[in-house]
Structure formats: structure tokens, C-alpha cells
Amino acid sequence: MPKRTTDHPGQLDLFVALMGEVPLRDDKEAMSVPVVSLAKGKRTTPIEWRSSSGERYVRVTANATHGMATIWDYDVIIWAVSQINEAVNKGLPTSPVIRFQPYDMLRAIGREVGGDHYNALEAGLNRLAGTMIETNIRAGNTMRKSSFHLLERWQHDIDAATGRSRGMMLELPQWMYDGVVKEHDVLAIAPEYFDITSGIGRWLYRLARRHAGKQATGWRFTMKELHRRSGSMQPMKEFARGVRAVVEKGVPEYRLTLQTGQTGEEMVVMDRDPAKVGMPQRRDLAGLGMGAVRSGDEHGGSSAPDTADHPPPDTADHPPEHGGSPADPQAK
């Protein structure tokens, strides 16, 4: 394929999606800050988040027609990031522009296929393309601000005679593409993630994967910190009720527990549960032609090593800004 003139020597104009099992990866920075709505209802109210130090920020705005992208829409981003990451691992040239068959992508993220589901996919792509992110995260040592859409564009080619899909195309924002290709800033996630039905549940799993990682001590957040970091429009009382429901039900790979801190604040403690990591998947992925799938970092690839999941506070990239803290053994 012809190559475009770019600072990525191996970058193509267009990358054709890989077939078969592709280990799941998520963008590490997007796992820690609010970039999508956690509710399925239409949202146009912006999300504003700033780190406790005030140095890092995220602002999310939505297209008035389609509304803000949801955490379910974000499954498309996870799929695309996973595709690019696997190609990088295999030494293949890549591009932020991915060509794929909607049938294959929908099956890979655990969705039904068919006409109505293709329409739902297109609606989600419109929300992703209409959701704008403004941030200074992933600026390295520079004073850089970035503005981009979660999808820069998408296209669905349909046969005029039969009405059948001839394939789709999407383009990841350069901010996210560079995070995979240049910085390898991704983490492995469990295929069971797609089985989580609650928006708060999906978000808590991603937050636990990002911050607790494989640390023996785990990580903890106060309920207030979680509410602020989530970008949720729910009142604190309703949000906390939703979090408690997720804690009771559980999430893949991690044990979530409620504790009361020394100041009396309700806290959620996240730590990796070895028993869950070894469990077989609830979904029969063999039926998708994907073979046996393992969860977490067992996939290998370019996910961060154990110490990079979330470094100890004195060596973290942004120690005071990540929020939360190591689990407190003295908490009740």
C-alpha cells in the first residue's frame, strides 16, 4: 500500500483490520479520566475535570444533534486500539485509518449483528465523531494542549443494488494513535469487560485496571473522588448507590470493597483478585471463531509491566494528580 508522508515511517494511508483473536487493549490515559458519558440517555452537558494539583485537565463537549459518546460507544475505540496495538506487536505498518467489516467488529465486542445493529453502530459512531476532547494530558515535557474528536471520521460503504454492507472505515484521533504507536501507552483488559452491563461498572473496572493494576496493596478512592472523576451527572447519593451495587455484584479481575476511612469518608478499595484472573470467561468466545481467550496481561503484547500499571506514589509520572491512594490497612 502507498505510504503517507509522516513522522511515523511505517504508517500507511489505510490499515485493514486483522482477523482472528486480537488481545484487548485500552488507552491508559483514557482509563483514568472522564472522556465519555456513563449513561445511555442523550447528554449534551459538558464534562469538566481537573486534577487536584490543577495542572492536568479534560473538557468534553458533545454535538447537540447526536449527544455525547457513551461508555458503550467506547467499545469501538477499545477494538480499534487493540487492532493497532496488535499490528505494532507483529511489526506491521499501521495507520489511524482502519478498514473493517462491521460484522467482524460487532462480534469481537460481543454485539448482535444485522440491520438494526448496524444502525445502532452508526449512531454510536456519530456520537464518537461528535464528542470533542480538550486536554493537556499526554504532553510529555511540553506545554501542549490538544483538541480532537474521539473519532475523526467514519464511513460505511453500502452496495446500492443489494443494500448490503461493503465495509466500513474509521479514523482514530492522532492523540490516541500516538499513544499506542509512539508511547505504547496501553493496558490489557479482560474480554469479560464487554459483559458488564452497568456504565458505572464498566468505568470502575477500567479505573481499577489503570490504578490498582497488579499491586499487592491495591488502590483506593473516596466516594467523592470517584464521583468527581467519573463525570457523572447523577447526584452524589444516586451515584454512590450505583457504585455500591457494582461492588456487590463484582467486576472482572478485581475485588472491590467498601471501607470507612479514618476521617469517616466512605471509600472503595480496589485490589486484584487472583481467583478471578484465572476464571474462564462467561461468554463463549470459541463461538466467535476466536479460540480460547485469556484475561488480563496473560495475552502478552505491549501493555505496561507490573510496575507501570500505577507506579508507587514517589515514582509516579504525576503523583498528586492521579487521585486516590494505596489501600490503607488501617481503614475499617
Image (tube, rainbow, N blue to C red):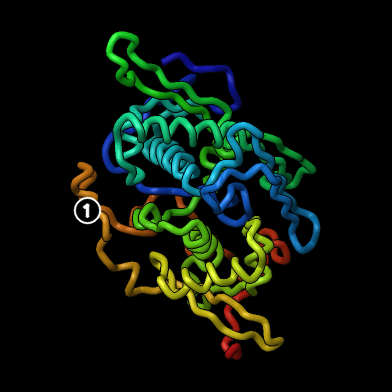
Query: Which quadrant is the N terminus positioned in?
Result: top left
Q: Give me the residue at 58% from left, 28% from top.
A: 152
- Badge 1 is on which residue? 284
Q: Quadrant location of residue 323?
A: bottom right
Number of residues whose C-alpha sits closer than 10 Å to that of mark 1, classed few (under 14), some (14–19) or many (20 or more): some
Callout 1 amino acid: Asp
Q: Is residue 172 visible?
A: yes
Quadrant placement of the C terminus? bottom right
Give the x, y percent position of residue 94. Answer: 45, 29
Q: Is residue 237 left or right of residue 126?
A: right
Q: Is residue 305 above or below residue 90?
A: below
Disc 1 element: loop
| Furthest residue toward top | 161
Name the residue: 48% across, 62% down: 201
* Res 158 → quadrant: top left
Q: Nearer the viewer, residue 110 or 244?
A: 244
Left or right: residue 265 versus residue 106 is: right
